[in-house]
Image: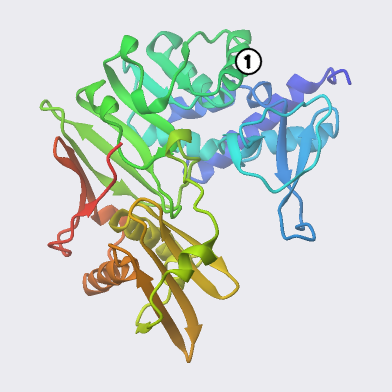
Amino acid sequence: MTMPAHLETDATQLRQTMAKGLTEGGALADPAWRQAVERVPRHRFVPGFYLPADERDEQGLTVWEPVTAELDYGRWLAAVYSDTTLITQFDSAEPDWKQPAVRHGGAPTSSSTLPSLVVQMWADADVREGHTVLEIGTGTGYSTALACERLGSADVTSIEVDPHRLSQAAGALYGLGYTPTLVVADGLYGYWPEAKFDRIVAACSFRAVPSALLAQTRPGGKILLTLSGWLYGYARVLLTVGADGAAEGRLLGGTVSFMSARTHAAPMFGNPAHWAAGLPGNARTTPHSPQRISAPTQEAFHLRFLVQSAVPDVQMTTVGEVVHLVDVVTGSAATLTPGGGGWAVREGGPVKLWERIERLLDAYDAAGAPGPETFTLHVYDGGQHLRHPQMPGLPLSLPRS
């Protein structure tokens, strides 16, 4: 299909409408970022993507429908200029957008993040003219283009672990006249040749703050990234790096999640029944339901991150009504089974997983259910710890990168 002659006119109108909506919604308070959104043609970065169908398949899997201009011009362009994340890749396999197929399930591994969040990240990191910036996770290149539009290409370095993804992004960026430094590199190690940076902003999540990023940030510079883990708890943090190389900063509010850096993804742990078979037969009753960390609520989202920080190597899965906790690092495991109006716990191994989680939940409740913004992350030579003034004696150790 040849693109309609009126594509650029349609796109410009939709882009103006999107920018207006983002401004009215509070996401574009800075006129300079609004101007960038109005100028950068997002459609040039997403020739194809997937959107979820209204219903799941017979196995309960999400049905992902491919969307391109050739398949449905109107749907494609409307989605491009909506405040929506567009999935562009599953399981690290690049789609054939000339003959795209419907997908059932799968793990998204690349996307074009919703524009409001992209701009929010640049704004939260306090990125301004004159700053040199490292972006981790080029993805489609749309976020990179916004930074180039605002700062100028010479001050922007963007790295991406997937060579094909970077090649696609580079084609779109260079085709529009943006010439940032683009590199195939692992975000865990930053990019030394262009260091040091005034700002580092990551569009993927890490289990802990990579030490290389601290070393590559100028004193007084800032790092904005998302912390995540194997329980899929997330928290954003804005760190300020000191002259001694240490850093600290408060967690930011909201329920933002990003795909994990590929080397930080959760490992496979096998059959939950095998882990449960080795647990002691005696069970005890717990005062806390596992739904406190699994419910689809903002508090559970926050608690899941705190719990994950206390037991950083734990994974959780539910089989039937039984909740399984598995720690592949220590060999510890636990199960929670509903019954009699409560939950019965069995746990074994060197770490009593649910007992440790109970202690954290008790401390959280005693502190009055503090929100994310009340926690501070300290990163120093001896480790990385979350701290809270009403939760003394409970430093939540994050895994070292």
Is 322 on the left-hand or right-hand side of 104?
left
Mark 1: amino acid? Ala
Q: In x, y percent, where is residue 147? A: 46, 21
- Is residue 29 among the parts visible in the rendering? no
Q: In x, y percent, where is residue 104? A: 74, 48
The residue identified by callout 1 is: 172
Which one is in front, 249 or 290?
290
Specify the quadrant that holds the N terminus. Answer: top right
Which one is in front, 247 or 40?
247
Label 1 crowd bin: few (<14), some (14–19), many (20+), radius 10 Å: many
Is 353 on the left-hand or right-hand side of 342?
left
- Is residue 66 among the parts visible in the rendering? yes
Tell me which corner region of the image, top left, top right, bottom left or bottom right, holds residue 320. bottom right
Is 38 on the left-hand or right-hand side of 188?
right
Residue shown at the point (69%, 48%) measured from the top left? 105
Q: In x, y percent, where is residue 66? A: 77, 37
Q: Is residue 29 above or below residue 167?
A: below
Count of marks overlaid on the render: 1
Residue sitting at the far right? 1
* Secondary element at image label 1: helix
Colour style of the rendered protein structure: rainbow
